[in-house]
């Protein structure tokens, strides 16, 4: 270390510059998201587990229970049962279950769907104590979220 | 009713109670300010969960420390190990005996107040060294070696600067030092350029030495957590550890109080009106904030750089200010200290 008065002065000034920068940051607003209390809305193309799209007015799923998604799923984690109710114009699902413990989020079901009845949800706060918590009944899950 | 108790005993009790409360409160809430400020400097909010704005966080931390067991690792020197947390806190509290908080608000108005602070302050090093030594831990021993060499290196410029101030003020009585800076900030010692043209530099040297003496970042070699776990404090748990922390923050308060008294006119108001204890506290806490600010701005220095800074820059600088002010005082002022025999 070669100490000269000039180097000492220069070093001191660089310290002042550093102090100025941190003080400026001090008065800026914080950028931290207080996670459990707040959470970010996920991006449009975020791929969460699939969910059923519903008619925005009636809340009835667009699914026609054709089982294409069930067949397309490489992990066999989707189960669909459907029936045509008396007087209804089309078939409707009576059961739509997703075993999220097996799902690899490949999206084959979304692509296979002919009636745009499946989409990726933006749920990501998913944690549980039991595997059974991840066997979703998508018919009920969508309703619960609406309420 | 209290007539039969000696007034000096009451005074002692008041001092002990008051100082312990002050030290405890400061240690707790400077930690809170430090954590909040550290957050803000990094654009985080800091503690928010316990109480409004995290204000009860220190209470929660204190309860946690109090409820933890103080472990005695096998092979430690039990007496020294138990003694050092006490030894670090007691002299620190003794330093508060002479601090003048306001006009006439000082536990004891000693004529050698300045000397008393440095005498008690020197215990800090010994307690840290003994803590590291008695812990039977390699990190703790490396840390105590660092503490000693760092404090020896920084004690010299610190005392040279204080000697300079002593010549300028002509007294070791902290109360009189403050009284001499009466009436407006231009009378504060930091702006007494006629007696020492390098006065602001003298303050900076004092400030840097104070940071080093209290083992604060960027000079926190003693507990460089990335190298030495927690340095001398590695083996301490519970309130044994808490005591070291309280002492560290109490030392910061003492250092900042001393800087306030020596350079910024103590309880005197900057514009010559309403002198009072609040000015002292405002100046002292502003300095404490700057200590935190420095910590969260600069990275830790290398150990050799630390010693180089002291021996190659601070000691020559403080010697220069000493010589300059003695020349200035000899030429332009009559020395007002000790009267000729």
Image (tube, rainbow, N blue to C red):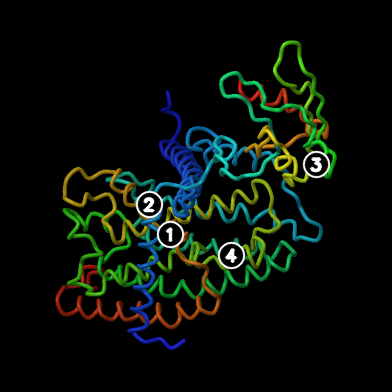
Between B10 and A129, the one lying in front of the other is A129
- Mark 4 and mark 2: span between their CA atoms? 22 Å
SS state under label 1 = helix
Which mark, residue B117? 1
The answer to which of marks 4 and 1 sits earlier in the sequence is 1
Nearest to viewer (mark 1 / mark 3): 3
* Crowdedness near tag 1: few (<14), some (14–19) or many (≥20) residues, C-alpha within 10 Å: many
SS state under label 2 = loop
**Badge 4 is on which residue?**
B126
Same chain for the residues under marks 3 and 4 in the image: no
Which mark, residue B99? 2
Nearest to viewer (mark 3 / mark 4): 3
Q: Determine whether A34 is above or below B246 in the image.
A: above
Q: For the N terminus of chain B, which image quadrant?
A: top left
- Mark 1 and mark 3: span between their CA atoms? 80 Å
Residue B332 shown left or right of residue B67 in the figure:
left
Tags 3 and 4 touching, CB below 8 Å:
no
- Please, which residue is most extreme toward the top here? A86
**Badge 3 is on which residue?**
A72
């Amino acid at each position: 270390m070669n100490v000269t008065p000039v180097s000492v002065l220069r070093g001191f000034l660089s310290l002042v510059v550093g102090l100025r920068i941190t003080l400026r940051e001090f008065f800026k607003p914080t950028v931290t998201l207080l996670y459990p209390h707040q959470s970010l809305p996920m991006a449009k193309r975020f791929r969460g587990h699939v969910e059923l799209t519903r008619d925005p007015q009636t809340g009835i799923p667009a699914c026609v229970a054709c089982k294409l998604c069930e067949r397309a799923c490489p992990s066999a984690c989707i189960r669909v049962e459907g029936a045509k109710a008396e007087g209804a114009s089309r078939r409707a699902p009576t059961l739509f279950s997703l075993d999220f413990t097996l799902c690899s989020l490949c999206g084959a079901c979304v692509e296979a769907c002919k009636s745009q009845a499946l989409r990726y949800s933006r749920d990501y706060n998913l944690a549980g104590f039991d595997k059974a918590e991840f066997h979703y009944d998508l018919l009920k899950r969508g309703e619960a979220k609406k309420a | 009713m209290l007539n039969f108790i000696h007034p000096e005993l009451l005074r002692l009790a008041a001092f002990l109670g008051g100082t312990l409360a002050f030290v405890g409160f400061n240690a707790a809430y400077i930690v809170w300010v430090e954590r909040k400020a550290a957050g803000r400097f990094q654009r985080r909010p800091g503690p928010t969960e316990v109480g409004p704005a995290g204000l009860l966080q220190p209470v929660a931390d204190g309860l946690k420390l109090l409820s933890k067991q103080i472990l005695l690792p096998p092979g430690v020197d039990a007496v020294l190990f138990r003694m050092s947390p006490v030894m670090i806190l007691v002299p620190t509290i003794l330093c508060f005996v002479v601090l003048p908080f306001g006009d006439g608000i000082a536990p004891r108005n000693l004529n050698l107040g300045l000397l008393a602070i440095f005498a008690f302050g020197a215990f800090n090093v010994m307690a840290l060294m003994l803590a590291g030594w008695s812990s039977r831990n390699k990190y703790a021993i490396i840390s105590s070696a660092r503490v000693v060499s760092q404090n020896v290196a920084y004690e010299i410029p610190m005392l040279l600067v204080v000697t300079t101030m002593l010549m300028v003020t002509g007294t070791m009585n902290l109360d009189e030092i403050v009284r001499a800076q009466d009436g407006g900030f231009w009378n504060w010692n930091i702006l007494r350029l006629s007696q020492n043209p390098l006065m602001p530099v003298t303050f900076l040297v004092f400030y840097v030495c104070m940071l080093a003496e209290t083992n604060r970042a960027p000079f926190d070699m003693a507990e460089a957590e990335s190298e030495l776990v927690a340095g001398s404090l590695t083996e301490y748990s519970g309130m044994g550890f808490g005591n070291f922390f309280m002492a560290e923050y109490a030392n910061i308060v003492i250092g900042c109080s001393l800087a306030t008294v020596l350079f910024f006119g103590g309880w005197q108001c900057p514009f010559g009106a309403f002198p009072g204890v609040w000015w002292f506290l405002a100046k002292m806490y502003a300095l404490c904030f700057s200590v935190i600010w420095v910590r969260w701005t600069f990275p830790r220095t290398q150990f050799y750089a630390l010693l180089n800074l002291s021996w190659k820059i601070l000691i020559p600088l403080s010697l220069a200010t000493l010589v300059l002010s003695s020349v200035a005082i000899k030429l332009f002022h009559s020395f007002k200290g000790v009267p000729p025999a």
